[in-house]
């Protein structure tokens, strides 16, 4: 279950070192997202520990890192502001239960319905979000207590340390890959700042991360239907965002590692993690694409990497808060900038002019909505637009060939899918007034998809019957005959040759 690679010492070493690197990067992210949600830093850190540990052990994607995320934090703001943090804990518990149910009913498979352009848009949008989140570290508090952009020496110092961090991460692997370059960069830049005595922002300047073990507590909210009505809408949105981001990240890690994760198992693990987190004073979370990319790029592949990251984070909270608070924020910002560069699909910029315009539009649309709204909305919008484009394109594929046979009957041979998007084109290709008194419509190469298609066939039959012309419908399946009203007696059934497929219709559900 743990897939610790005990028989492969090098892999275990990579997992442990990579996990330590990820833990260092988790600290400022968890603190920042806690501030976004309007809660104490420890609420975010506890969430990163608990969610990270449970999903690392039981999740469906070894090597993927989970914790407190910005995508979920932005949804929590209004709930915490209006009702308080205890309602947030109750909401996180309900979120987890919803996610567990999604896994039990195997809804994770529907992530396969997300088209590739939507995936590209998701990745690019999230890279932009990660980049924008780092810009807040370039602000300082002035004498009036307001945030303003850095200027002068502090700005140049921070920019220099960020560039140094990025250079170490890029060039160190050319010397050796025995130690993750990200870990070397964080430790090296921290020692440089300490040795020279540079005046720059440290993790401790943002917030203290010292604390004790998380303790079990039932959320202090009234157990009533009114409470349920308050937390349910938030829980549904959080569950959707958490699962979409987790499963899309799972798909991305699958592509990077050439392996395949288990989406439904991941849904259950994410749900269990959030349920437990709610009872231990955490803000909940989901998979983190940035930290997952750091882990994979640092050599983390097994469950040991995620377990190490979670346990190391707890160790920082309990025993090493002073050391972690001494890390320059510039080093961690540099790490995240490398993540942004590695996450953004630069190839998508080159192919925008080569792919169909609809796909290019979807990529840009999903990226934009991810940045300005949230991930769940972006993916839903992308899937809907892609589905509409698919329907529009396939509506053009209905072809009706007209001919006259030896008996003088007019024969129409229909090819392609008949569904709500193609019925107008289907009906336009028939000319009842010009046809002979005997008409044959051949559906051997066609497929009736939905109830709209049935209604179109009924309409077609009515046009011919109103002109007192005989009509024969061949090679329709048995369900068509059951659903037809005006043309049911015109269907010529052939048990051997007639196709057998199902039509989307509530009448047969």
Image (cartoon, grey):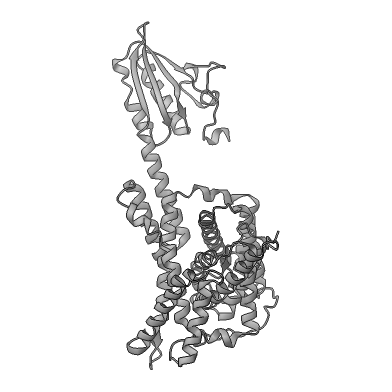
Closer to us: 217 or 499: 499
Task: Identify the residue shown where x is 59% and y is 50%.
Answer: 107
**Residue 350 left/right relative to 84:** left
Q: Position of residue 122 (x, y in %)?
A: 44, 58
Q: Position of residue 196 (x, y in %)?
A: 45, 92
**On the rendered image, what quadrant is the C terminus found in?**
top right
**Residue 81 left/right relative to 151:** right
Total number of numbered discs in the rendering: 0
Instruction: Say whether residue 227 is visible.
Output: no
Task: Identify the residue shown where x is 43% and y is 91%.
Answer: 199
Q: Is residue 58 above or below residue 178?
A: above
Closer to us: 424 or 12: 12
Q: Position of residue 305 (x, y in %)?
A: 61, 67
Closer to us: 292 or 119: 292
Residue at the limit of the structure toward the front, as seen here: 175
Task: Identify the residue shown where x is 56% and y is 61%.
Answer: 239
Q: Quadrant of residue 343?
A: bottom left
Q: Is residue 256 above or below residue 188?
A: above
Q: Position of residue 468 (x, y in %)?
A: 37, 13
Q: Quadrant of residue 446?
A: top left
**On the rendered image, what quadrant is the N terminus found in?**
bottom right
């Amino acid at each position: 279950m743990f897939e610790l690679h005990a028989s492969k010492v090098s892999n275990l070493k990579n997992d442990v070192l990579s996990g330590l690197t990820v833990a260092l990067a988790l600290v400022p992210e968890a603190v920042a997202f806690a501030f976004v949600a309007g809660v104490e830093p420890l609420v975010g850190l506890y969430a990163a520990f608990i969610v990270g540990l449970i999903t690392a052990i039981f999740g469906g994607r070894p090597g993927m890192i989970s914790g407190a995320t910005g995508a979920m934090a932005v949804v929590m703001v209004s709930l915490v502001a209006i009702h308080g943090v205890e309602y947030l804990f109750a909401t996180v518990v309900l979120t987890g239960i919803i996610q567990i149910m999604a896994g039990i009913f195997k809804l994770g498979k529907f992530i396969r319905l997300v088209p590739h352009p939507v995936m590209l848009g998701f990745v690019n949008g999230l890279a932009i979000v990660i980049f924008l989140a780092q810009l807040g570290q370039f602000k300082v508090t002035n004498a009036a207590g307001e945030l303003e952009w850095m200027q002068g020496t502090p700005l140049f110092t921070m920019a220099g340390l960020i560039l140094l961090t990025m250079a170490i991460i890029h060039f160190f692997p050319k010397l050796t890959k025995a130690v993750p370059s990200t870990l070397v960069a964080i430790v090296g830049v921290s020692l440089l700042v300490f040795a020279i005595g540079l005046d720059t922002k440290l993790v401790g300047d943002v917030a203290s991360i010292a604390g004790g073990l998380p303790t079990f507590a039932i959320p202090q909210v009234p157990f009533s239907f009114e409470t349920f009505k308050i937390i349910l809408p938030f829980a549904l949105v959080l569950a959707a965002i958490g699962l979409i981001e987790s499963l899309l990240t799972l798909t991305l890690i699958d592509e990077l590692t050439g392996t395949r994760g288990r989406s439904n198992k991941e849904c259950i693990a994410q749900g269990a993690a959030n349920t437990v987190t709610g009872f231990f004073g955490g803000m909940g979370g989901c998979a983190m694409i940035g930290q997952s990319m750091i882990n994979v790029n640092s050599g983390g592949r097994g469950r040991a990497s995620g377990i190490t990251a979670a346990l190391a984070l707890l160790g920082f909270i309990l025993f090493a808060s002073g050391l972690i608070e001494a890390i320059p924020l510039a080093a961690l910002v540099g790490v995240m900038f490398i993540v942004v560069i590695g996450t953004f699909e630069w190839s998508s910029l080159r192919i925008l002019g080569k792919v169909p315009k609809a796909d290019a539009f979807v990529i840009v649309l999903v990226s934009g909505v991810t940045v300005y709204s949230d991930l769940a909305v972006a993916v839903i919008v992308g899937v809907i637009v892609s589905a509409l484009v698919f329907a529009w394109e396939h509506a053009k594929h209905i072809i009706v060939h007209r001919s006259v046979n030896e008996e003088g009957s007019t024969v129409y041979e229909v090819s392609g899918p008949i569904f709500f998007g193609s019925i107008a084109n289907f009906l336009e290709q028939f000319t009842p007034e010009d046809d002979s008194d005997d008409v044959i419509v051949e559906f051997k190469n066609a497929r009736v998809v939905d109830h709209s298609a049935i209604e179109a066939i009924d309409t077609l039959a009515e046009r011919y019957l109103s002109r007192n012309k005989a009509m024969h419908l061949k090679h329709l399946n048995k369900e068509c005959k059951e659903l037809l009203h005006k043309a049911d007696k015109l269907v010529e059934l052939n048990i051997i040759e007639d196709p057998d497929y199902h039509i989307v219709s509530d009448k047969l559900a």
